[in-house]
Amino acid sequence: MDSLTVASKVIRCDDSGLVSLTDLYAAADAAGMAQGKMEPKKWAQAPHAKTSSASGRISVSGGPGRQFIDFVAENLKVNAADILKATRGKGGGTYAHWQIALAYAKYLSPQLHMQVNEVYARAKSGDVTLADEIADKASPEQQTWLAKRMNSKVARSKLTTTLAIHGVVGRGFGDCTNATYKGLFNGTKKQICAATGVEYKKGKSLRDVMSVEDLIATSMAEVVAAKQIDKFNVRGNSACADECERSARKVAGLLQ
C-alpha cells in the first residue's frame, strides 16, 4: 500500500507500510481539525525529566501517544524505533505503524479518526474502487505507470499459474523470476538493485521501482515464457527457469 486518501489529502506510506503521521496532521489542519493538537513529533515524544529553574523541582513529561506506542511495540515484540520513524529532507516526516496512525487520528479528531478507519478498512479488504479513487488524483505519468504495473501483475499471475501446473515448486518461482531478469537486464534482482542503488529487500518487488518501459518488457517476457512452457510442456524448476531466461532474451532482442 503506497498511500491512502483521507479528507481529500494523500496520506503516504513508506516501503515498510508505515503511515505518515505528518500527512495525517496536515489533513487535519487543512480541515480545521488540528487546533490545539500536537504535531506528531511532540505527540510521540518519550518521557523526559525537566528541572525547574525557579523551584528546582523535577517534573517528567512526554507526549500523550508514547504509552500506546510502547504498548504496540511490546505486543509486536519489536523496538519502538521499528514502528515509529522520522525521515528528513523532501518527502520526510514521521511515519508509524497503522495502529499508531489510528490512535493519532483519534487524538486529532473523532471525524478524522472515523475517516481513517473507513479508508484503512477498505484498503485491507482489497476494495479496488479505492485504488481507482487514488488513481484519479494521480498525475498522468503516475497513471501511466499504474496501468502498466497492473498489466504486469496480470502477466505475472498467468506465468506463476503456468509454472505451478508444470511442476515448479518452492524456490523455483524465485529462480524463474531471476532468470527473466537475467534475460532482460543481465542480472538477478539482487544484482540489479546493487547496480542501480535500489535497496534490496526479499519481500519487496523490483517492479515497484521499474520504469514503464522495463515493466512492459518484463510483462512481455513472462507472457512469452508462459506460452512456450505450455506449448512444449516444459516441466520442473530448472527447465522452466531456462525457458524464462530464453524467452526474456528473445524479448530483449526485439526491443533493442
Image (cartoon, rainbow, N blue to C red):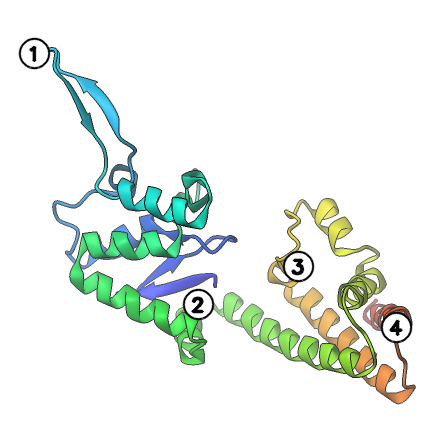
Mark 4 belongs to which amino acid?
Answer: Lys
Mark 1 belongs to which amino acid?
Answer: Ser
50 shown above or below 122: above
| Relative side of 73 to 57, left or right | right
Q: Which mark is residue 250?
A: 4
Q: Nearer the viewer, mark 2 or mark 1?
A: 1
Which numbered disc, 3 or 2, marks the residue that appears first in the sequence?
A: 2
Q: Label 1: which residue?
A: 55
Mark 3 belongs to which amino acid?
Answer: Leu
Q: Label 2: which residue?
A: 138
Q: Which mark is residue 95?
A: none
Q: Nearer the viewer, residue 181 or 30?
A: 181
Task: Indicate the position of residue 179 as horizontal and vertical percent values.
Answer: 83, 64
Residue at (92%, 86%) from the top-left corner? 232
Which numbered disc, 3 or 4, marks the residue that appears first in the sequence?
A: 3
Residue 180 appears in the picture as rendered: yes
Residues marked 4 and 1 touching at CB (< 8 Å): no
- As measured in the structure, the alpha-carbon distance from the residue carrying label 3 to the one carrying label 4 is 21 Å
Which numbered disc, 4 or 1, marks the residue that appears first in the sequence?
A: 1
Residue at (68%, 68%) from the top-left corner? 215
- As measured in the structure, the alpha-carbon distance from the residue carrying label 2 to the one carrying label 4 is 34 Å
Q: Mark 4: give few (<14), some (14-19) or many (20+) Cα within 10 Å.
A: some
Q: Nearer the viewer, mark 4 or mark 1?
A: 1
- For the view shown, which residue lies furthest in the bottom direction? 231
